[in-house]
Image (spheres, rainbow, N blue to C red):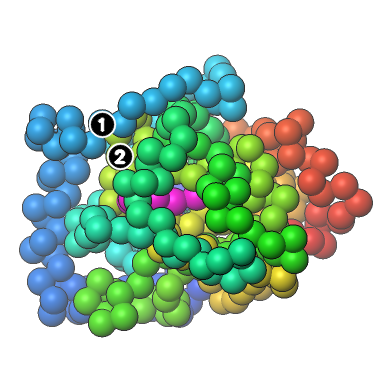
Amino acid sequence: MLIRTKGEIPSSEITPKSVYMNRRKFMAAAAATGLAAVAGESASRLLRPSSAQAAEDKLTTVKSQYSTPGLTLTTFEDITHYNNFYEFGVNKDDPSKNAGRLKTRPWTIQVEGLVKQKKTFDIDTLLKMKPLEDRIYRFRCVEAWSMVIPWVGYSLSEFINACEPLPSAKYVQFISLADSKDELLPWNAGISWPYSEGLRMDEAMHPLTLLTFGLYGQALPNQDGAPVRVVVPWKYGFKSAKSIVKIKFVKNQPSTTWNDMSPNEYGFYSNVNPNRDHPRWSQKRERVIGAPIFRQLQPTLMFNGYGDQVASLYNGMNLIKEY
Ligand code: MTE
């Protein structure tokens, strides 16, 4: 994972070497497949959507009791141009340039594993399943930067109930899109696709865990994980899998992308915790993306500030050891 700002830790020191070294491969693959040409067009569309496009993408929302009050929002521009979406490149501005390639319709989520019966949900059915709420959350990346994002969605628990998991299901795994023909992902970044993440069942059922379809009142831009992702506001951002195509209910802790790659750096829980540094950098402070210079560095909050709501999920656990 990366930080590119001058004076901070260079990408090469934060990103696992295999990923960093693969940037060259990505550039070559992008050139070979014409990705760069497609990117220019889609990036400008996302930056300045035509009024027809903006109207089409607009979501009808209601207020939410779970929104975090009193925060200054990160701009739409920063939220959509400073991304981690390694399927589309390793630099922060790569996803906004390259994710136009992602086709978000038709789109389904398959439900598998320990469920009453396998099901497939169409994205447009999911969008209408419950009222979409505006939820402002703090968003904290493991790379020690943060944003405040007005997401749109409803509690993942609503969807999980519709999936009808069996009592034996203890964890849920989220699997992102990967094109078997490798057209979408002409490179591998040192990561074996599809991207996958997981939560314990009680974490997934917590009302703050959001099945997310949009931000700033409109459908998710591709680079932010269109058409549907998960957001877990008290955990580091990598727990929030984007562009989900499959959800699996399982008995044992599932394997997850970053934990598999570097288990001593990226734990399964990955709760935001200022007392548990990453082996290569401190987690005590965070850089607020887009904030005025004098307010850019702020202390990291335990559970990203959501401790009152979620700390009890971890009663009896040693959060330094089980990071
Ligand atoms: N999901 C997929 N499929 N691929 C990714 O590379 N990156 C993760 C997470 N979900 C990632 C992903 C990481 S490291 C972070 S910090 C957040 O997405 C970034 O979300 P954002 O770009 O919307 O801020």
Name the one closer to the observer, 158 or 146. Answer: 158
Looking at the picture, which amino acid does disc 2 mark?
Ala
Query: Would residue 58 appear left or right of 176 to someone viewing this image?
Result: left
For image coordinates 48% across by 57% down, the residue present is 241
In the rendered image, the residue lying farthest to the top is 70
Q: Which residues are magenta?
A: 226-233
Name the one closer to the observer, 221 or 200. Answer: 200
Membership of 230 in magenta stretch: yes
For image coordinates 49% across by 45% down, the residue present is 211
Task: Name the residue beneath numbered marker 2.
Answer: 219
Looking at the picture, which amino acid does disc 1 mark?
Lys
Q: Point out residue 161 in the picture as x, y percentages from the top left corner.
A: 60, 48
Membership of 179 in magenta stretch: no
State the image quarter where residue 297 is shown.
top right
Task: Name the residue beneath numbered marker 1.
Answer: 58
For image coordinates 17% across by 49% down, the residue present is 43
Please state the total of marks drawn on the protein image.
Answer: 2
Mark 1 nearby-residue class (10 Å; few <14, some 14–19, many ≥20):
some
Q: Secondary structure at mark 2?
A: strand
Q: Are marks 1 and 2 in contact (CB under 8 Å)?
A: yes
State the image quarter where residue 102 is shown.
bottom left
Image: 80 above or below 51: below
In the rendered image, the residue lying farthest to the front is 117
For image coordinates 79% across by 40% down, the residue present is 311
State the image quarter where residue 269 is shown.
bottom right
